[in-house]
């Protein structure tokens, strides 16, 4: 039996000790004396959140298929364990071996959302790794970041040795081969980083210099050496069907956020919502073959014992083989009461046929995302939904036996006004009315419950709205108050529940999303004040961020409220995602004019993603 990094007395003193012991079903243990590369895969949040992340599961499986690599996992210790580790000077450790992270060759950190940035510094600090890349010796792990937030890595640039831009299945083997070769040759850390920068998708911040104009805007972003590429091109897998996929995912000891089998049916999205970063950076849309998905489902259910299958994608109803896949799963597993979850469905495409197939297995609430209450604003954001679509889809759902519907909207969108906000309440009221009009009393399965949730819009890099302005926390709360007041005035208000997001957190997310290297000092100052887990309400203290802004002299309004010229050089412009800047500009102009852009299957809009040579861009072509 392996020796744990912390003794029983410590484990019994903290919440959920199973977060720290490893040895879960399907976890991989290797002989560390027979491998060349040790990789610590990190999700900088608590275990239950990190264990639900599909990207880490894929890379964990892929890396461990190599005989010369051992990939282990590490997550952010919760506040109680964090405190004990500091008091007793215990180094952060990996779950599988319980060895210190400092002993590894790589520390790979998945950066999924902006409010985990202080946790990244927690991971480095508890590991004994200097926070700044420039202070690390050859004995420190190479710290590499990836995930959606790596598409603007600049606020974190001083803390990382490198970033991987894109999907990890393509270039990690090349990176490992290079590291293994240079390690045997006795090359230095800097020599390896210089050579790694030649690999497509690898960005090494220390090899670039940044300069600013007098008004604070970015003047120039240039490599320091001629052999370092001026632009970094994202890496994506074009053939998803044959791509590696974890058929034996690690099963946690305690309930994770997504405690189920996850079948990724496709990547990308054809819709082109102008606020959606994922819909742009994961272009073009690529699908997995249904027969391969059936095989994955069989293997994963057998290897995990889960009782639910989640069909995952940005827009599951756009998966062209959805009906056949659902038929297979219902026919094979319906009698075993395996639940089939269908998230990310468009209300206009959620057919009564699909609903009737899954409803007999297990009922759950349905989730739809109109995003905006008025048709005018839905056109501006290019949602491509009419009120008729929404009410018609709700009627189908209610007739199919559902009575609980969750509706997601955003507040603070470009061109939004109070009438648009009040229309959120009006739309929810109409949906509730559809239930009472369409479903006879004797056929109702409980009362109708409409849950309306609003988040506050955050402009993200590589979207048509990357130039949009944000508002103050007080403004956002005023927007929510308008919606709340209007909901209470509706005829069906007793059937409607309203939730809204935290305003201060939204402003900080916007600050970090479009930040540059100067923002790193703020992140570090907040971390050194003792703050971690900013995404958790009980741990979030806005005053620490305000103090950090004052002490560093960084003005958050410069990054959030300031209008941007469409020609301004942006901190992430050195990254090539295939989607062109001219397309994003054109979509911004269409938004201001209220023009709707057709989805990719209706008409190609020339976004630039055809450069990757496949996916939806080439459907139907020989």
Image (spheres, rainbow, N blue to C red):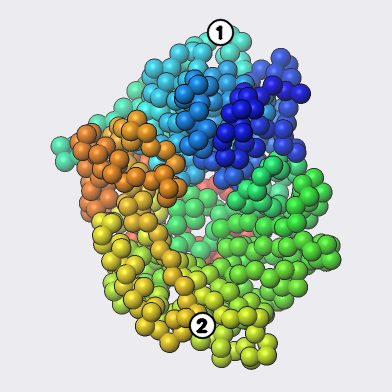
Disc 1 and disc 2: Cα gap in Å? 68 Å
Q: Residue at x 28, y 44 (%)?
A: 543
Q: Residue at x 34, y 45 (%)?
A: 541
Residue 4 located left or right of residue 348: right
**Snapshot quadrant of residue 303:** top right
Q: Which of these two is toward me, 311 or 461? A: 311
Q: Secondary structure at mark 1?
A: loop
Q: Which of these two is toward me, 172 or 514? A: 514
Residue lying furthest top: 186
Q: Quadrant of the N terminus?
A: top right
Residue 75 located left or right of residue 289: left
Q: Residue at x 38, y 19 (%)?
A: 134
Residue 526 visible at all: yes
Residue 94 visible at all: no
Tell me, yes or no, whether the two marked residues, 1 and 2, touch with CB atoms within 8 Å. no
Residue 22 located left or right of residue 227: right
> Residue tagged by mark 2?
432
When the figure is inspected, residue 420 is found, relative to residue 605, above or below; the finding is below
Please tell me which of labels 1 and 2 falls first in the chain.
1
Q: Secondary structure at mark 2?
A: helix
Q: Residue at x 36, y 51 (%)?
A: 505
> Residue tagged by mark 1?
186
Q: Which of these two is toward me, 105 or 259? A: 259
Q: Which of these two is toward me, 449 or 82? A: 82
When the figure is inspected, residue 169 is found, relative to residue 68, above or below; the finding is below
In the rendered image, residue 595, in percent from the top left (x then y), is placed at 37, 71
Dot in front, 1 or 2: 2
In the rendered image, residue 587, in percent from the top left (x then y), is placed at 37, 61
Q: Quadrant of the C terminus?
A: bottom right
């Amino acid at each position: 039996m392996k020796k744990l990094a912390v003794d029983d007395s410590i484990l019994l003193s903290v919440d959920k000790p199973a977060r720290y012991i490893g040895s879960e079903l399907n976890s991989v243990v290797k002989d560390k004396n027979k491998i060349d590369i040790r990789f610590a895969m990190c999700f900088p949040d608590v275990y239950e959140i990190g264990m639900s992340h599909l990207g880490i599961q894929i890379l964990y499986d892929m890396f461990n298929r190599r005989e010369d690599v051992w990939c282990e996992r590490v997550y952010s210790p919760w506040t109680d364990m964090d405190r004990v580790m500091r008091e007793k000077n215990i180094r952060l450790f990996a779950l599988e071996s319980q060895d210190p992270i400092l002993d590894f060759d790589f520390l790979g950190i998945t950066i999924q959302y902006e409010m985990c940035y202080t946790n990244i510094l927690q991971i480095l600090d508890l590991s004994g790794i200097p926070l700044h890349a420039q202070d690390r010796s050859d004995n420190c792990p190479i710290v590499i970041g990836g995930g959606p937030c790596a598409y603007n890595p600049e606020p974190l640039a001083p803390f990382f040795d490198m970033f991987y831009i894109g999907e990890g299945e393509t270039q990690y083997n090349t990176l490992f081969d290079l590291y293994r070769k240079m390690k045997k040759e006795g090359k230095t850390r800097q020599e390896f980083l210089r050579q790694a920068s030649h690999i497509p998708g690898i960005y090494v911040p220390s090899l670039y210099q940044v300069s600013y104009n007098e008004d604070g805007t970015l003047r120039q972003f240039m490599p320091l050496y001629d052999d370092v590429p001026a632009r970094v091109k994202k890496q994506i897998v074009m053939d998803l069907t044959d791509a590696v996929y974890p058929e034996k995912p690690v099963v946690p000891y305690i309930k994770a956020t997504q405690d189920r089998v996850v079948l990724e049916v496709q990547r990308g999205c054809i819709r082109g919502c102008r606020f959606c970063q994922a819909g742009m950076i994961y272009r073009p849309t690529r699908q997995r073959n249904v027969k391969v998905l059936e095989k994955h489902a069989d293997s994963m259910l057998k290897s995990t014992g889960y009782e639910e299958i989640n069909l995952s994608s940005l827009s599951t109803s756009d998966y062209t083989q959805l009906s056949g896949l659902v038929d297979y799963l219902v026919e094979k597993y319906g009698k075993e009461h395996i639940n089939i979850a269908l998230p990310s469905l468009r209300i206009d495409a959620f057919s009564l046929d699909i609903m009737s197939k899954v409803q007999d297995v297990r009922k759950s609430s349905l989730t739809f995302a109109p995003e905006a209450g008025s048709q005018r604003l839905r056109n501006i954001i290019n949602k491509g939904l009419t009120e008729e679509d929404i009410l018609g889809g709700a009627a189908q759902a209610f007739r199919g036996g559902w009575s609980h519907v969750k509706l997601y909207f955003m507040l603070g969108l470009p061109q939004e006004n109070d009438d648009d906000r009040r229309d959120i309440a009006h739309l929810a009221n109409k949906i509730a009315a559809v239930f009472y009009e369409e479903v006879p009393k004797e056929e109702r399965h409980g009362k109708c419950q409409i849950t309306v949730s609003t988040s506050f819009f955050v402009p993200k890099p590589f979207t048509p709205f990357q130039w949009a302005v944000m508002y103050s926390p007080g403004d956002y709360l005023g927007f929510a108050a308008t919606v709340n007041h209007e909901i209470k005035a509706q005829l069906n208000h007793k059937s409607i529940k309203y939730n809204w997001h935290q305003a201060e957190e939204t402003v900080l997310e916007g600050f970090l999303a479009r930040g540059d290297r100067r923002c790193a000092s703020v992140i570090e100052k907040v971390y050194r004040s003792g703050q971690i887990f900013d995404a958790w309400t009980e741990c979030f203290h806005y005053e620490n961020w305000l103090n950090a802004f004052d002490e560093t002299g960084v003005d958050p309004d410069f990054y959030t409220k300031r209008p941007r010229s469409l020609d301004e050089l942006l901190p992430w412009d050195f990254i090539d995602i295939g989607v062109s800047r001219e397309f994003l500009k054109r979509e911004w102009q269409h938004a201001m004019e209220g023009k709707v852009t057709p989805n990719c299957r209706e008409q190609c809009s020339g976004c630039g993603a055809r450069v990757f040579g496949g996916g939806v861009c080439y459907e139907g072509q020989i």
